[in-house]
Amino acid sequence: MDLRGLRQFIAVVENGSFTAAAEKLRIAQPALSQQLRKLELELGCQLLQRLPRGVMPTPEGQRLLGHARDLLARAAAVRDELRGEAAAPIGDVTLHLPQSVAGLLTVPLLSAVLKEFPQVRLRVVESMTGYIPDWLRNGRIDLGMLFHAEAGRGLSLSRLLEEQLFLVGPADAAPEAGFLGVDGNGTVPFATLAKLPMILPGVPHGLRELIDQMARRHGMKLQAVAEVDALAQLTEAVAAGLGWTILSFTAIREALRAGRVQAWRIDRPAISRSVYLGRAADRPGTRAVIAVERLLRQVMTRIVQDGGWPAVLAPARCPETVIFRQAQRLDLGSGSK
């Protein structure tokens, strides 16, 4: 059982077929099938179940998957140690970003990695944050951004920033009518939300839980007329005038730029959520992973300080604390577009 065979096994499982895995690994499909069959014979068990379309791991294959990812990570750590601190980072890094953040961070981060660490191959995966803790624990990804520290069992989490949340309404909403209670700083009181028909993510979506907790704490009941989990569809429903919602700036950035929605900071009290970066606590981080993490922090810091992300940064010297630096104010006005 060698590392190359384990890497090929992981590729087949993650791609769900020999054809897709062979294309990704740039080897012939018959050779890949032969290698995996050899691995099965060596271990004395069936690792993959052949389906009409593709393959899936057997229970034995699922157990091997976790061990294989762990062994490859540890092998990479040994390679880093033997190459020495002066050597440039090298290897693959998989980073998971939430849907609401990927559009803001992916391009500048990729640009920074390609420029500073050309031997690091970064893969950015985008989906809902609910998958991230398990994917980190089983080694499917190296780094993942999430919004709940309580989801971090078995993970090493560091707080990156605290991002502000906004009331989002249709572009033709009229704040001058006074029903929103918009003040001179372009903020609305949290109590205003109880007056509006809200379209919110469904339970147990993390954002919905945060909103509900805040409402209960202040004795309010929100009028949730519909539930939509997908951020793009949620934003479009608001743009169509079907209701109002609460989202982060990163989730509505493009819709604001296109003038399809308006947004106001929620204040009195403000509502915000913490953003964390996690990795598996029991798996050593390679120099490539550490390098990507450092660049990610630099990119985020630059965006926040330039006013492109309404958020408060965690101190770089102590990312786990709840002490934050005040970020530069992003002027959204009374109804930013």
Image (cartoon, helix red, strand yellow):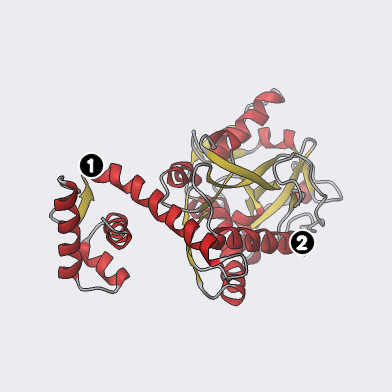
Number of marks in the rendered image: 2
Residue at the top extreme, as displayed? 219
**First in sequence: mark 2 vs mark 1:** 1
Label 2 packing within 10 angstroms: few (<14), some (14-19), many (20+): some
**Local SS, label 1:** helix
Residue 236 location (% of width, % of height): 52, 55
Left/right of residue 314 with respect to residue 170 in the rendered view? right
Residue 53 seen in the current view? no
Residue 148 location (% of width, % of height): 58, 38
Q: Tell me, for residue 45, which label it has, or none.
A: none
The amino acid beneath tag 2 is: Gly
Label 1 packing within 10 angstroms: few (<14), some (14-19), many (20+): few
Q: Please give the name of the residue rendered at 43% of the width and 46% of the height, measured from the top-left corner.
A: 135
Left/right of residue 287 with respect to residue 164 in the rendered view? left
Residue 72 location (% of width, % of height): 40, 55
Residue 281 location (% of width, % of height): 53, 42
Left/right of residue 83 with respect to residue 269 in the rendered view? left
The amino acid beneath tag 1 is: Glu
Q: CA distance from mark 2 to mark 1?
A: 50 Å
Q: Nearer the viewer, residue 290 or 197?
A: 290
Q: Quadrant of residue 224?
A: top right
Q: Which residue is mark 1?
A: 60
The reply to whether dot 2 and dot 1 touch (C-beta < 8 Å) is: no
Q: Please give the name of the residue rendered at 59% of the width and 54% of the height, measured from the top-left corner.
A: 251
Q: Please give the name of the residue rendered at 56% of the width and 61% of the height, measured from the top-left corner.
A: 287
Residue at the right extreme, as displayed? 184
Q: Is residue 42 above or below residue 83?
A: above
Q: Is residue 205 above or below residue 160?
A: above
Q: Which residue is mark 2?
A: 307
Q: Please give the name of the residue rendered at 26% of the width and 56% of the height, measured from the top-left corner.
A: 16
Residue 292 seen in the current view? yes
